[in-house]
Image (cartoon, rainbow, N blue to C red):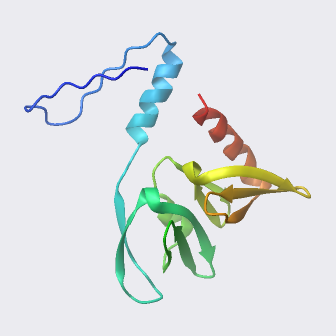
Amino acid sequence: MKFNFKANNDAVDWFITLEADADQSEADHFLNYLSEYKHYEIMITNRTNGRQALINLQDIIAVQVNRNNLEIITVDAHYEIRSSLTQFIHKLNHDFIQISQSSVIQLSKLTEVKSNWGNAMAVLDNGVEIEISRRYLTKLKNRLEESSW
């Protein structure tokens, strides 16, 4: 794969041209990924200390429902906020996937999917293991197959 960058001081926004010896579906898949990719930070109010924090999406490992709150697990901290999982999912980018009714993980932080007596577990790069419900397991497998191209 080769990349070419051309500076244009008059450009208002990014303009990307894709040239490849690939079929249209592969190109469409790649362009769809680029258009859905969001890399930004979100502002939250931590319920444990009342402080606001700016969290980079790339630092989020997982989000889990904890009673009426959400626990956001990041590379270096845990945050608790008042929000529904459904509302919070809309703030996340395409790299996140729901793996149960109460858990979302970042795919790039997933190191292994292991089976334990009929239950599937997501092993994340910080060592945390989160159960994957059977209802969401097929979606996870499909996303992993998509991302392996």
Q: How many marks?
A: 0
Of 83 and 73, nearer the camera is 73
Q: Is residue 136 above or below residue 62?
A: above
Q: Quadrant of the C terminus?
A: top right
Residue 34 in the image: x percent, y percent? 40, 35
Task: Name which quarter of the figure residue 103 lies in.
Answer: bottom right
Q: What percent of the width, then of the height, locates residue 10? A: 7, 31
Q: Position of residue 16 (x, y in %)?
A: 29, 26
Q: Is residue 69 above or below residue 121?
A: below
Where on the picture, by quarter, is residue 131? bottom right
Q: Residue at x 24, y 28 (%)?
A: 15
Residue that protrudes farthest toward the bottom in the picture: 49
- The quarter of the image holding the N terminus is top left
Q: In the rendered image of this protein, does residue 62 appear above or below residue 137?
A: below
**Residue farthest to the top?**
21
Q: Nearer the viewer, residue 122 or 85?
A: 122
Which residue does the image show at 60% across and 60% down from the upper left? Answer: 104
In the orientation shown, which residue stands out farthest toward the right? 117
Q: Is residue 7 left or right of residue 105?
A: left
Q: Could you tell me if residue 141 is visible in this image? A: yes
Horizontal side of 106 relative to 10 (left or right) equals right
- The residue lying at 19 percent from left, 24 percent from top is 6
Q: Nearer the viewer, residue 94 or 90?
A: 94
Picture coordinates of residue 22 (x, y %)? 50, 13
- Give left or right: position of 1 versus 113: left
Q: Is residue 91 visible?
A: no
- The residue shown at (79%, 52%) is 114
